[in-house]
Structure formats: structure tokens, C-alpha cells
């Protein structure tokens, strides 16, 4: 029986990379027009391309070309594969961000073409989170085409396999592209590579051809080569085809394919630490848009009207910036200002809508003779913790006879802090509150001319050691937790990094630091009754650092707020947490879940938090919402904070351009919460993971606050 090589003509389109997005528009128009011309000239040719963003742009700019594409799609000669808004990075977006990639693409394609493809298609994404199979099946996609990680980066049992993220999860069928997803000159060696690593009994494979990255698609020379060499490989025949046709051809043998469980990682570890501004901007935008969805009817699944149009456009901007080179930090530096402005516009739209909604709801509150602090928990998770707020008191500092009470008139313990501004007549309050998901209520009333309730301090300070009532504390050298558990304070390690922007060719950064932070003596900032904190200033080579350590009454964590002005060229900065005893298991946050990973020292993308289980039965939880990569061994954890690389530098170019720009210089801020307690190694630590997720969400989504003065007496 003759075996079939399915030749997939495509034109991988990078809308932003070594060119700005405006050039990406030109690339899309030229490529899709060229594809139509080739389809017209060759009636047996099939072309594959499927990002909804590209179709959307063509529809806006060249409606006649769009109608030509629709005709070829109807004829089955233009295959829409993937159908997501763009081909995103598949590790860094939130799970709802990845969902929006699919939702936006599906909605557009179903409206314009009448269907959504069952084949997902992320051929250049640098790795694939373990939660993807579950997500794809949720939206009716049961097949997947990818290329990275390649054979030398992650051995797999076969080129064609079944994939699930976790035991018992839904499965999808995956094909890993051999060598490259596009090629300028087709060779027999390129085609033969697609024959390697096929499972026993499989008599079909896919070979991807066509010009790509900056578009292109099929050329006359390539088409002629394919016709001439259709039977050049003994026992195989090449045909013009597509991913859907391939998966249909092997569908009867699906259950015979090998099964892979877990994530598919990884390629280009540097993409999870280089150019941090786009990563933090995307994370902030995703949370604000998610909050708007939760609180605002018009920002839920789009309806008719201006608000829903604003909602859809905001998500389009964010999803466009999910593109794997954009979010991966590998684009030219001049491309990023516009992308950051687009993402910032989405964030600003969501924040404005949320604050307007809060003020609308305030109109339903009854009048009160005293000023109130109103909070809205724009989250699907409860908030329970401390908030800081600067109420407007008409240029008056907080007097000694002013009290904070709840709606029942009961005193609320609070603490005065230094205001953000270096100016007179301002007050900053710290107090604890609890809010249910999406709750809006009065969390405090400001009562003048009252006798303040006595508050017993839960903070003790002695010899630069700060402790709370739970036995949790810290000094410049150690973190102390209840039950006599303690950790050495984290170190800041500076590592040499000669790699290109992607960090091609490595799966980890060097172990030995070339520099460490030098710290001055700590200075106590807050002395209770609710918060104790101290500040340390330091220097790491040419980069000034500030570390503020905090402990709160009633809380089981130590908090670190770290800021620095990063100036170290071609270096990596790691926060290193030495472990008191060997680690036996480790769980990292990933989009939409958690994944157990090996403590093998390899660099991995992470989401928000990490849990380390130690062999003495203790558990170390680290909440790190501003960190995107980490590595761990049995002796230590290293969180990757910053990486200063040449931008858009690809090996083998020596990177010697006098005008080359370095990434990530300037001010960066990080937040961490450290938990350390005894746990139960005999069961999966769901409760602890949920707690870490909850704390990460509270840092990402603090309550929205407003002052309400309606009904106040003049003297109030």
C-alpha cells in the first residue's frame, strides 16, 4: 500500500517580530493575496492559514480579497487551521487569556465562515502548558499541530501521539513538525525528516512547506518541485494536503498512538524572563479585563452596544500582544512602545469601567453623617487581608480623637502609615477587612471627636527582628515561622549570561554567581500595632536595591517588597531561597492550574506561585505574582527576576552592533509572600495550592476603594 506525505503549504506569519506591527499588516495582505493567486493558477493546490486576526485585517482593508478567501475556504482549498486570534505564547498568558484567544477566533470565524476548525495550530510557540488539552477539548478541538520543543529539546515516543495534561484528563492528537514549518528551498532531506519517528503502522505524515515568518506562502518554484518529486521517495507519494485531511486519514488508528502526559517543554528559556515590561503589562491587563467581566454585564460575553464593543476591542488588543514573539520579548525594541500602548489602552478601559461602576453603585447607598470608605472586591475569589487607603481629609492630618468603626459602630483596629506623597496634611490608613466575591460595601466609617479604642499591638520588635502574634517574623538574615520553623533569608545572585535574546542552546542558567547584593543595616519603618516592617537599602554592582520586609498581625506569611534600578548588561538576576533540608516534590503554577515538576535545575515558566515539599514533612510556599520563570534543585529555589539581554539578537549573529539595545534597564518592582509550615506528604496538597492561588489573586486584584461623603455634617 502506498504511503502518503501530506504537503502542507502555509505561510507562518509573525505580525510583529523583526519588524513593527504595521509591516505585519503589509505582510498579511501580500501573503494572502499571493496565496489566492497561486490557488487560482493551480486548481489542485491547497493552502493552510488560520489566525482570525489576519482575516479580520484583510476584511477591513481589502474586502474583495476577503471574498476571494471565503470562496476558496468554501471550496475546501483554503484550510483554516487553528482559528485562534493569533498564535500565542502558550505558557505566559492566563487561562482565561488563552480562552479568549479561542473565543475571539471562534466567534469571528463562525460569523464569517460558518465554522470553527477542530485542528488547533501553534506551530512556532515555544512550549505548551499541560492545561492546553483540556482547554482545546472544551472548545471542540481534538487535534493539535506544533513544532517546539523539537527533538533535541524534548524526546517524545513518536512524531504523532496522544497528549493529555494530567492523569484522567481529555486527550488530543498531536503532530510534531519535523525540522521547520516553512522552507525557502524544498529538499528531499527536508521531506524525509517528516518520515522519521512515526509510530508503527502509521502510513501518513505531514511535511510543511512554503515561505514563512514574514509571510510568503507557496511559490511557483516550490509547487513545481513538489510535482516533479511526488514519487521521488520510494514507497511514498507526496500530495497537496492540509492538517485536517491528515488527521482524518489517521483517525482510525488514533487509539494505537503512544500517550504523553504532562507539559511539552521547552524551547528558548530566555523568553520567560527577557523584556519584563510586556509580561507585567499583559498580566495586569488580563486581570483588569477579567474583573470587568465579573462586575459589568456589558463586559461579559459581548452584546450590542458601545460597552460590549469596547470590551471586545480590549481583548483583541491583549490577545494580539499574546503573540509568542511579542510576549516572549524577542521583537525589535522599536516595536514595543506601540504594543505597550495598545495593552495599556485595554487596561485603562477596564479600570475606567470598573471605577465608574463602583461610583454608580455608591449612588444607592443611604446618606451617612460620617465619611465612609467603600470597597469593591472585583474578583471571583474572597478577599481577606489588609488594605492601605489615603482618605481625603481636607488637608488635615489624622487627629488623635478620630476613630475608625464598622457599620455597626464597632471600632476597627487600624494603623497610621506614612503617606505616599512627601507632603503635609495627608493620612494613610492600614486596616484589615473581609469581602466576598464581587461584594461592594462600606468597610469603614471615619468618626471624628471620638475616643479611640485601645489597640494591643500584635507586633514585637527587638534587635532588628520583627515578629507578629502568630510567631511569624523576620530579620535581615532569617525568616521565622511558627512551630520553630525558619529559613535563611533569600539572596540576590547575579549570573553571567552570554546567550542571545532567546537563550538558544541552553535549558538552564549558570549556577555560580558573579556577584551578590551588599546590604546596609536595616531601618525599622512600621512598629505596629498591625504591621511591622523594616527597610534595607543595598547595591548589586551598579544597581541600587530596596527591600522592604513586612509581617502583619494574624498572618502566617512574611512579605517582601523588592525594587531595584537594574543596570547590569548581559546578566541574569535570581532571588535564591536556600532550603533547610532536601526537597522531594515541587508544584509550579501554570495557566489554569498546577503541575508537579522535577527539581532538576532546568529553567521553567511559572504562574504566580510555587510549592516545595521537603523531606522532613514541611512545606514552603512562595507567592510571586511578578515573576515569570524559575528553577529549582533539591537544595535551593531560584526565582528569575530580570534578564538583561541584547534585544532581537539571534545566534549566530555576534551581537556586536553599536546601536543594539539592552532589555529591561530601569526600575522594577516585585512582591513575594513566603509561607513555611508542616504539611502532609501523603496526599496531594490541594488546600495549600488553593491558599497560594488565593494570595496571588489578592495581590493581583486588591479591592477598589472610594471615599463617600454624602450626608456628612459640616463638622465631620
Image (cartoon, grey):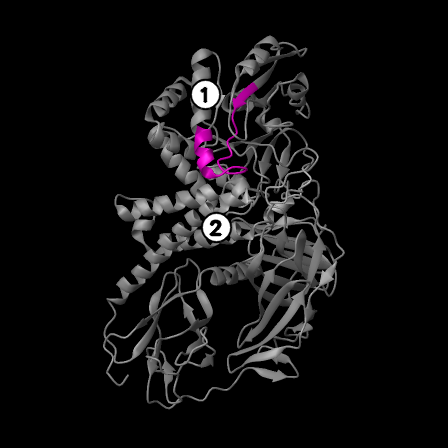
**Residue situated in front as seen by the camera: 581 or 23:** 23
Q: Position of residue 352 (x, y in %)?
A: 34, 57
At horizontal 40% and vertical 21% (from top left) the residue drawn is 73
Q: Position of residue 174 (x, y in %)?
A: 58, 31
Circle 2 SS class = helix
At horizontal 51% and vertical 37% (from top left) the residue drawn is 19
- Label 2: which residue? 282
Please state, as top left, top right, bottom left or bottom right, where the C terminus lies in the image: bottom left
Crowding at dot 2, Cα within 10 Å, few <14 / some 14-19 / many 20+, comes out as many
Q: Is residue 28 left or right of residue 538?
A: left
Q: Is residue 226 left or right of residue 23?
A: right
Is the Cβ of the residue at disc 2 closer than 8 Å to that at disc 1? no
- Was residue 25 drawn as part of the magenta stretch in this picture? yes
- Label 1: which residue? 34
Q: Which residues are magenta?
A: 7-28
Please state, as top left, top right, bottom left or bottom right, where the N terminus lies in the image: top right
Confirm whether residue 43 shows in the render.
no
Amino acid at each position: 500500500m502506498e504511503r502518503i506525505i501530506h504537503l502542507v503549504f502555509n505561510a507562518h506569519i509573525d505580525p510583529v517580530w523583526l519588524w513593527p506591527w504595521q509591516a505585519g499588516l503589509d505582510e498579511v495582505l501580500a501573503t494572502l493575496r499571493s496565496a489566492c493567486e497561486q490557488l487560482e493558477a493551480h486548481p489542485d493546490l491547497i493552502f493552510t492559514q488560520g489566525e482570525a486576526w489576519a482575516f479580520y485585517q484583510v476584511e477591513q482593508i481589502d474586502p474583495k480579497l476577503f471574498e476571494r478567501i471565503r470562496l476558496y475556504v468554501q471550496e475546501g482549498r483554503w484550510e483554516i487551521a487553528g482559528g485562534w486570534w493569533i498564535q500565542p505564547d502558550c505558557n505566559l498568558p492566563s487561562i482565561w487569556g488563552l480562552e479568549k484567544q479561542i473565543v475571539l477566533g471562534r466567534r469571528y470565524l463562525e460569523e464569517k465562515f460558518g465554522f470553527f476548525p477542530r485542528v488547533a495550530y501553534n506551530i512556532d510557540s515555544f512550549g505548551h502548558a499541560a492545561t492546553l488539552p483540556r482547554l482545546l477539548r472544551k472548545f471542540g478541538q481534538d487535534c493539535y499541530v506544533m513544532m517546539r520543543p523539537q527533538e533535541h529539546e524534548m524526546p517524545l515516543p513518536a512524531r504523532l501521539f496522544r497528549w493529555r495534561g494530567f492523569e484522567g484528563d481529555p486527550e488530543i492528537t498531536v503532530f510534531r513538525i519535523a525540522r521547520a514549518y516553512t522552507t525557502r528551498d524544498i529538499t528531499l532531506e527536508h521531506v524525509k525528516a517528516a518520515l522519521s519517528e512515526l509510530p508503527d503502522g502509521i502510513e501518513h505524515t505531514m511535511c510543511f512547506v512554503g515561505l514563512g515568518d514574514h509571510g510568503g506562502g507557496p511559490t511557483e518554484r516550490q509547487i513545481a518541485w513538489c510535482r516533479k518529486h511526488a514519487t521521488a521517495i520510494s514507497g511514498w507519494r507526496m500530495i497537496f494536503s492540509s492538517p485536517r485531511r491528515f488527521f482524518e486519514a489517521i483517525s482510525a488508528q488514533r487509539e494505537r498512538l503512544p500517550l504523553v502526559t504532562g507539559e511539552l517543554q521547552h524551547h528558548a528559556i530566555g523568553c520567560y524572563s527577557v523584556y519584563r515590561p510586556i509580561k507585567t503589562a499583559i498580566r495586569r491587563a488580563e486581570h483588569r479585563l477579567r474583573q470587568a467581566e465579573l462586575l459589568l454585564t456589558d463586559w461579559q460575553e459581548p452584546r450590542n452596544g458601545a460597552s460590549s464593543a469596547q470590551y471586545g476591542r480590549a481583548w483583541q488588543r491583549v490577545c494580539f500582544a499574546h503573540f509568542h514573539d511579542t510576549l516572549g520579548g524577542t521583537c525589535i525594541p522599536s516595536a514595543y512602545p506601540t504594543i505597550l500602548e495598545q495593552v495599556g489602552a485595554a487596561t485603562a478601559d477596564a479600570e475606567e469601567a470598573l471605577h465608574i461602576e463602583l461610583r454608580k453603585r455608591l449612588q444607592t447607598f443611604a446618606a451617612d453623617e460620617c465619611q465612609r470608605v467603600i470597597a469593591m472586591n472585583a474578583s471571583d475569589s474572597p478577599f481577606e487581608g489588609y488594605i492601605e487607603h489615603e482618605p481625603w481629609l481636607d488637608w488635615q492630618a489624622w487627629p488623635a480623637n478620630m476613630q475608625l468603626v464598622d457599620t455597626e459602630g464597632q471600632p476597627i483596629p487600624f494603623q497610621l502609615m506614612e503617606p505616599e506623597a512627601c507632603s503635609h496634611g495627608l493620612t494613610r490608613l492600614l486596616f484589615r477587612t473581609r469581602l466576598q466575591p464581587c461584594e461592594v460595601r462600606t468597610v469603614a466609617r471615619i468618626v471624628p471627636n471620638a475616643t479611640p479604642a485601645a489597640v494591643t499591638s500584635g507586633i514585637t520588635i527587638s534587635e532588628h527582628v520583627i515578629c507578629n502574634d502568630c510567631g511569624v517574623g523576620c530579620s535581615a538574615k532569617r525568616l521565622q515561622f511558627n512551630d520553630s520553623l525558619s529559613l535563611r533569608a533569600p539572596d540576590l545572585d547575579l549570573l553571567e549570561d552570554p546567550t542571545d535574546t532567546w537563550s538558544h542552546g541552553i535549558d538552564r542558567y549558570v549556577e555560580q554567581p558573579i556577584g551578590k547584593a551588599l546590604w546596609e543595616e536595616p531601618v525599622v519603618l512600621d512598629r505596629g500595632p498591625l504591621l511591622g516592617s523594616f527597610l534595607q537599602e543595598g547595591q548589586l554592582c551598579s544597581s541600587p536595591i530596596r527591600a522592604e520586609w513586612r509581617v502583619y498581625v494574624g498572618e502566617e506569611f512574611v512579605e517582601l517588597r523588592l525594587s531595584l534600578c537594574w543596570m547590569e548588561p548581559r546578566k541574569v538576576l535570581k532571588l535564591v531561597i536556600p532550603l533547610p533540608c532536601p526537597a522531594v516534590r515541587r508544584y509550579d503554577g501554570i495557566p489554569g492550574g498546577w503541575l508537579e515538576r522535577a527539581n532538576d535545575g532546568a529553567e521553567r515558566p511559572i504562574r504566580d506561585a510555587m510549592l516545595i515539599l521537603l523531606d522532613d514533612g514541611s512545606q514552603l510556599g512562595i507567592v510571586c505574582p511578578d515573576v515569570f520563570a524559575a528553577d529549582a534543585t533539591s537544595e535551593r529555589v531560584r526565582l528569575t527576576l530580570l534578564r538583561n539581554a541584547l534585544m532581537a539578537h539571534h545566534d549566530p549573529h555576534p551581537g556586536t552592533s553599536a546601536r543594539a539595545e539592552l532589555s529591561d534597564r530601569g526600575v522594577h518592582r516585585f512582591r513575594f509572600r513566603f509561607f513555611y509550615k508542616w504539611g502532609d506528604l501523603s496526599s496531594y496538597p490541594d488546600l495549600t495550592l488553593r491558599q497560594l492561588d488565593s494570595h496571588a489573586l489578592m495581590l493581583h486584584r486588591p479591592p477598589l476603594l472610594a471615599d463617600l461623603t454624602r450626608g456628612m455634617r459640616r463638622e465631620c
